Amino acid sequence: MIQFADQALLSKNLATILLDAPITESLDDFELQDPNEEQLRELLEKWEFRTLTKRIFQDQEEQQQEESPIFKSLKTISEVSHDYRLIDSEECLTELLDELQGAKVFCFDVETTSLDRFQSDLVGIAFSSKAHEAYYLPIERWPHWKEKLSALFESSSLKVGHNLKFDLAILSSQGIRVNGPFFDTMLAHTLVAPDQKHGMDALAENILGYCPIKLTDLFTQSEQPDDDLFASAAQKKATKGELDTSQIPVEKLAQYAAEDADVTLQLYEKLAPQLEELGLSSILNEIEAPLLPVLVSIESEGISLDQSVLDDVGEKLESTIKTLSEQIESLAGRPFNLNSPKQLGEILFGEMQLVEKPKKTKSGQFKTDEQTLAALAPKHPIIANILKYREASKLKSTYVDALPNHRAPHSQRIHTHFHQLLTSTGRLASSDPNLQNIPVRSEMGKELRRAFTARADGFLLLAADYSQIELRVMAALSGDPAMIEAFQNNHDIHTSTAAKVYGIDPSEVLPEMRRTAKMVNFGIIYGISAFGLSQRLNIPRSEASEVIKSYFEQYPAIAEFMEEVVESVRKDGYAQTLSGRRRYFKEINSGNATVRANAERAAINSPIQGTAADMIKIAMVRIHKILEGRKSKMILQVHDELLFDLHESEEAQLLPLITEAMENALVLPNQVPVKIDLGTGKNWLQAH
DNA sequence: GACTTCACG
DNA sequence: ACGTACGTGAAGTCC
């Protein structure tokens, strides 16, 4: 029941507060002068007690005022009622199970001692299947919790959670099998509003108008629970250590955990229809949600790292770095920090004056990137040494030195984090460590791939790559007959392009021509410009223009496709992949030509890169099912490649199954075939 | 924390 | 006249 002491005062202050608030829809009808009780009630229901008090408190804190009348009056408003229960008896547990087993949808949220998925203990699990109602089960008090709950997790109910990858990882490490379907409110919100924040607190406030208790607040000790809310806000930065939830009294934690589960379920109820309205449900239901357990599995498997290989490569790099530093400093005439682009720029262009007018970066420093330096190589021997130093130094610090620190204590393997919807195109991203940018292009860099090995004797690494996937996607989306024909006849696409562009027979294509054609093909995917191409190929812009013109004459449908994408983004505001994944471009109609051109290139690239991402994600889901119950495991995804720890006994059987799953994950339009290259070996280098 | 550079697809 | 290839993450410097 909502009550308030001084209606007039309350409404005035509420209006002030709410005008700054993100939820404004209900304010349109809000009569500021004389709000009636009904309107206030509506607002209060939307915002709830804690959200309001938080805002008022912040306001008061900023102005360093005494406790305001509004503050006092709000204390008299009762919270929107909820029923959060600590499961401390068999009766209560039975009640939970009865309720959840009958529910088509329920939400759960695990509480742990740490955010590290491999070094945290399970403390408790909260459940909710109805708004404003939730249960919290403390693991400590239920030694046989697995037997009690396993059927629930294996049920076919829709499992809702926020950042489910974490919860699934924790439960999986406990040996609990959790069956889908899943609905992750974080993923859902990322699809619905990619530019906003997706943390639960942000969502609770922006979507539900509700401000949940912060976990950090539970650590502040207080004699009077009533004052916690206000005391903790004042000292919110006081405690920022380990968030070990097992240190919190169970009754307190129960309220927090239950609230999270409750809020998450309420978020699901809001987000599911939004997703449906935008036509994004199938992306979540058919691709991203099924991918969750696959990523959990990949991350938990990890990959073996052979330290002796790293040591060998590291030693070589070390001596290269030492020799080169000495040579460079002697050529420069004085010692300086080789790792500082600023200092290097001053040496090369300030002191040595290698060029008339050196290129500058945005902030006015001398440019010293590889492209700039490579052009200066003939001018002075120091340049070649600097480039070699840069390469060695990069390999040493980013890979040789850093990778071993990521070895997990429990497995001695490397477990990357995959970010499912971080990118704007739909690709995965990998971090801590990033295993999607392990060197392969340079000879020295390649050697590092020998350090990534099969898990044990009897296993091999299998690399399965999509061949030219983005060009195939572009051929399919554009429907260009010439490019489609090249793929259907399994021709080398760059040679074929060179032959067309130069008007010669494929047999007459010289390596240089093929190289140019390859750059053009890539350039097209990136939303080509004559300037960009001329830079990469080191040719005059006029020449680049000619090549592009000839390209579009040979592949007219590709030119049309590019225009159509830009046109539809101008009209609808977004580009989409074959599966309907969207990316919005608000700058597509910018008055600034540069900004607009950037948006246009990104818009052209999006459906291509994004469709390829859709395809491999679907393939991963399919392959994960195929591998169920087998020794072989999927262990990595690198955009167009999947890496497996393959048991030798399963090789003959699995290779065709994996190939089929990848080839047919997403059927491309216009009969464009999809091709897979396979390779095996004891390490990642050999597997290619 | 911004900036620069460079590893990958 | 302007200033671009698309998408990422990490390490190092420097303020």
Image (cartoon, coloured by chain):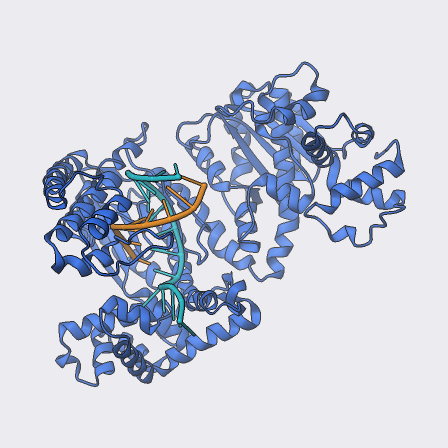
Chain colours: A blue, B orange, C cyan
Q: In the picture, residue A544 is in which quadrant?
A: bottom left
Split into 4 quadrants, where in the image is the N terminus of chain A? top right
Split into 4 quadrants, where in the image is the C terminus of chain A? bottom left
Q: In the picture, residue A645 is in which quadrant?
A: top left
| Residue closest to the eye, A44 or A475 | A44
Q: Position of residue A86 (x, y in %)?
A: 65, 24
Compared with A30, A488 (above or below) is below
Q: Position of residue A34 (x, y in %)?
A: 90, 46
In the image, is A368 to the left or to the right of A528?
left
Q: Residue furthest top?
A: A223
Q: Position of residue A615 (x, y in %)?
A: 39, 60
Q: Is residue A682 visible?
A: no
In the image, is A686 to the left or to the right of A173?
left
| Count of marks placed on residues | 0
| Residue closest to the eye, A553 or A618 | A553
Q: Position of residue A604 (x, y in %)?
A: 42, 69
In the image, is A554 to the left or to the right of A441?
right
| Residue closest to the eye, A87 or A395 | A395
Q: Is residue A456 visible?
A: yes
Q: Which residue occupies 25% across, 47% down?
A: A346
Compared with C14, B7 (above or below) is below
